[in-house]
Image (spheres, coloured by chain):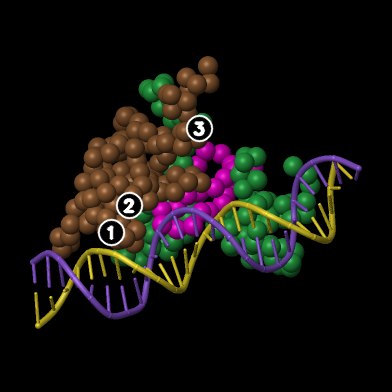
Chain colours: A brown, B green, C yellow, D purple
Amino acid sequence: MKYSRQREVILEEVKSRYDHPTADMIYKAVLEKIPNISLGTVYRNLNQLVEHGLIRKILIPDDSDRFDYCLSNHQHLYCTDCKNVFDIESDVLKGIDAVIEKETNYTILSHEMVFTGFCERCNRKKD
Amino acid sequence: MKYSRQREVILEEVKSRYDHPTADMIYKAVLEKIPNISLGTVYRNLNQLVEHGLIRKILIPDDSDRFDYCLSNHQHLYCTDCKNVFDIESDVLKGIDAVIEKETNYTILSHEMVFTGFCERCNRKKD
DNA sequence: ATTCTTGCAAAGAGTTTGCATAATA
DNA sequence: TATTATGCAAACTCTTTGCAAGAAT
């Protein structure tokens, strides 16, 4: 990838936050630093960064895609109450691709997983 | 839910096929039986059937949603080569929601999981 | 000099919604 | 009769794309 300031700032933005933002949230944030950046550029760069494995895209049921800096094996929880995405630190799924590959005749490259439920805060609200 | 022939035929269509169709594929199939049904009605009914737990929606990375009749615990493989969705018979994920719930302070209601890779047929093509 | 990237705006795909009408309970 | 569902079309959201201009190698 040829260098571009737009891509650098976009990647920094994804890296620096932990709220699993949508493309539009990233666009709005990056606007502060590059006031004339376009939404198309944000989408193009996010997709490129995903393709190059620098960030990942998280699919949310009935909601727009989120982006996350690629770190260790971790899972995600989508809280249907506050609509936020939270990290789940758990290694129960470690090596699952290899397990499935052994059990079937498929080639497994990756998987997408999202849990749906309630976060801590929304759990407490219900008491 | 109040009875409607449209919904009945839509549910039968999802029940009867194993190719994890998109809303549009279901619409085209149902058109054969109800020639004046509208795409909006298909979407409305699919969503209702999902909400009532009769069918499930499968999220596919960078592709449209698929629908599947709700059966036992099984997983899905999205073949990036032929773009089809296949069933994976495996119980490695059985009880995973409860495990995560024990490990965290979240309430887990459900999860979405899709493996990405190659199906048997596309695997063979590569040899 | 060549290739990649940008901003802009328009288009695209997929899905939802408002409304008057029709069917169900 | 009251409620829910329908067909139609328009609207809506999210995302992609064509293009001429600009930046990076």
Q: Position of residue C17 (x, y in %)?
A: 63, 52
Left or right for B5, reference A126? right
Do labels 2 and 1 touch, CB within 8 Å?
A: yes
User: Does residue A113 appear anywhere in the picture?
Assistant: yes
Graded by Cα atoms within 10 Å as few (under 14), some (14 to 19) or many (20 or more), the crowding at tag 3 reads few
The residue indicated by pointer 2 is A27
Chain letter for mark 1, please: A
The answer for how far apart the CA atoms under marks 1 and 3 are is: 32 Å
Left or right for C16, reference A95? right
Residue with the most extreme top position: A127
Q: Where is residue A75 in the image (x, y as percent from the top left)?
A: 35, 36
Residue A81's tag is 3
Q: Nearer the viewer, residue A125 or D5?
A: A125
Numbered-mark total: 3
Chain letter for mark 3, please: A
Q: Looking at the picture, which amino acid does disc 3 mark?
A: Asp
Residue A37's tag is 1
Where does the magenta region start and end? B54-76
Q: Looking at the picture, which amino acid does disc 2 mark?
A: Tyr
Chain letter for mark 2, please: A
Q: In this view, does A127 lie above or below D18?
A: above
1 or 3: tag closer to the N-terminus: 1
Eye-nearest disc, 2 or 3: 2
Q: Which residue is drawn at 57% across and 45% down?
A: B56
Q: Which of A108 and A49 is in front in this view?
A: A49
Q: Which residue is drawn at 50% across and 42% down?
A: B74
2 or 1: tag closer to the N-terminus: 2
Q: Which of A58 and D15 is in front in this view?
A: D15
